[in-house]
Amino acid sequence: MGIKYIDELDIKYKKLLIRVDFNVPIDKNGDVSDDTRIKSVLPTINYAIKEKAKVILISHLGRPKGKRVSELSLSKVAERLANILNKDVKFIPDCIGEEVKKIIEKDLLPGDVCLLENLRFYPEEEKNDEEFGKKLSQLADIYINDAFATAHRSHASNVAVTHYIDIVGGGFLLKNEINYFDRAMKNPSRPLIAIFGGAKVKGKLNALINVVKKVDKLIIGGGMAYTFLKSEGFEIGKSIVEDELLETSKEILDIAKKNKVKCYLPVDCVAADKFSEDAVTKILPIQEIPSGWSGLDIGPATVTLFTEALHDAKTIIWNGPMGVFEMDAFSQGTFALANSVANSHALTIVGGGDTDLAIHRAGKADKISYISTGGGDFIELLEGKELPGILALNK
């Protein structure tokens, strides 16, 4: 039947339980240091306010492991949300129980917003406990999931809760994530180009195996490229390598050839004598990395090669940086590629926390078609998996 989204449901004057992802960074003073995730769900929250729903927000924060940890309370997040909305946000210091129900019934008026305490203060949340899901469902008339970044988890707040509430749906953020992904992978404008980076092949192995059969071009950079390069017979010095995946990496390149997918690997790198900001560095062809040195960024010839490969792209998916961009000495490759992707005429979709951060640091976020809020979720979609939190909404 498909997912119903919030604007397809009658939410007027209803109690609306919205699962959001407010797992935001908190500084030493206990304040929110980056409110990007809060702002990403504002369209859903504002729509619910406009429709005069009673808005009940639920989220986790950090990993309290089923115990109350004061530093991981969502109270400060409620304050930041109130500032952003320019509206009172009632913080309720629990997320289930009669007292919570009573406050929602008596104190929450149509168009009001409340944020409940950290779901993960209860071990039942991460266990996808049915009874815990049932208690959450008793707080509201309708359930909306707008937390794409947690959709790959089977937790009580995104799976079990849907078993006990008749009307469920998705928020605008979830809708965007699914729609953009479908445009990229299910019905793409071609050429479709996938860019993979980051440190290791292992975490992206299944995604690579799935994607290599569907794209027109595959670009591989970052630390993971050295496993592929070694599988092709290159000497890579002390660069990061996963020897146990050499055979598999070779097989992925063979699949690419078989499917007539053009595959691009680095041809030069910024090599360093140690993993440090103050390392001695050289720009070298891949074939010339000294035995005691490591490749920590792609070099200018590789940037040119990758940029040329993008020239005719109609759709680009990017996950993972091209080097250790957190260190200035090894950031230029990632930032240069960010510039090339941003200046393309393609539909551009970027996923993964590191890539998101790199795009923002490069100052190119406003020129990317869509930046996904998901990390693990984005990779699992690239693997071809169905996400539990999304499947649960197909009622």
Image: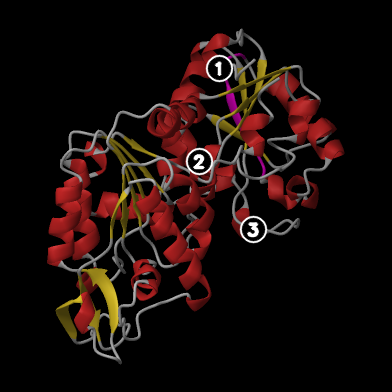
Circle 1: is it few (<14), some (14-19), or many (20+) Cα within 10 Å?
Answer: many
Residue named by callout 3 = 63
Front residue of 13/382: it is: 382
Point out the image quarter for the N terminus. Answer: top right
Residue named by callout 2 = 79
Q: Quadrant of residue 151?
A: top right
**Residue positioned most to the front:** 258
Front residue of 214/331: it is: 214
Which color mode does the image show?
secondary structure
Residue pictured at 25% horizontal, 33% vertical: 314
Front residue of 255/49: it is: 255
Question: Are the residues flagged by discs 1 and 2 in contact, CB closer than 8 Å?
Answer: no
Q: Position of residue 365 (x, y in %)?
A: 26, 43
Q: Quadrant of residue 3?
A: top right
Is residue 57 something one can see in this rendering? Answer: no
Dot 2 falls on a residue whose secondary structure is helix
Residue named by callout 1 = 6
- Please say if 377 is above or below 203: above
Question: Are the residues flagged by discs 3 and 1 in contact, CB closer than 8 Å?
Answer: no
| Circle 3 or circle 2, nearest the eye | 3
Dot 3 falls on a residue whose secondary structure is loop
Q: Which residues are magenta?
A: 110-117
| Residue 115 forms part of the magenta stretch | yes
- Please say if 315 is above or below 34: above
Q: Position of residue 172 (x, y in %)?
A: 48, 24
